Image: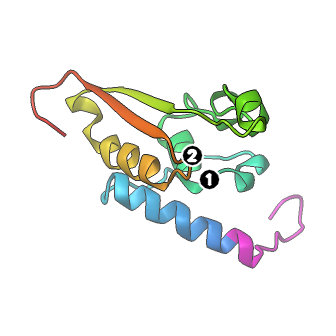
Amino acid sequence: TQEGTEEVMTEVTRQWLVRAREWLKRLDPQATVPPSARLPQSALNWEPAAAVLFVLTHGHFDPRRDVPAPKQAAGAAAEARGDPGLVSVCCATSDQRRSFHPLIYESFRRQTHAQRELVVVHTGEQPS
């Protein structure tokens, strides 16, 4: 409740929370969200995976800052001309970031852009 008024959770919000919990389990089945974790109201407009990253990184990853709006993304002008071109996704990672590896691959797999490549620079000893 906020200031004595009861918040009503919509079905859309419930479904969003279910998807966010699924992403959290993919990253780390043992992970829990600390009771002190808070998301801004705008998080309901984020992909659930982005909200999970926001919480797990204690706000160091913030979609409001780190994810460009579709029209601000590089190549938006080329896409408007009907020539979207190749999109390269580059990720640097290490053994300490192993719990994030499934998220990298799943997020890339879900992208709808036809011409894309994933470049993973892994500095660890064990392959992901």
Furthest toward the front, the residue is: 82
Task: Assess whether residue 96 is covered by the magenta stretch.
Answer: no
Q: Report the quarter where the C terminus lies.
A: top left
Nearer to the camera, 79 or 55: 79
Give SS at disc 2: helix
Is residue 36 visible from the viewing direction of this image? no
Q: What span is colored magenta in the figure?
A: 1-13
Mark 1 neighbour density, 10 Å: few (under 14) some (14–19) many (20 or more):
few
Q: Amino acid at mark 1?
A: Glu
Furthest toward the left, the residue is: 125
Number of numbered discs:
2
Name the quadrant containing residue 78: top right
Nearer to the camera, 56 or 107: 107
Q: Badge 1 is on which residue?
A: 47
Q: Main secondary structure of the magenta part?
A: loop
Residue 5 on image: x %, y %: 89, 68
Name the quadrant containing residue 124: top left
In this rendering, would 91 be left or right of 128? right
Is residue 120 visible from the viewing direction of this image? yes
Tell me which residue sits at (24%, 30%) in the image: 96
Give SS at disc 1: loop
In this rendering, would 119 be left or right of 20? left
Whether the residues at callouts 2 and 1 have beta carbons within 8 Å, the answer is: yes
Furthest toward the top, the residue is: 123
Tell me which residue sits at (31%, 30%) in the image: 120
Mark 2 neighbour density, 10 Å: few (under 14) some (14–19) many (20 or more):
many
Q: Badge 2 is on which residue?
A: 50
Q: Amino acid at mark 2?
A: Ala
Nearer to the camera, 13 or 105: 105
Residue 59 on image: x %, y %: 58, 33
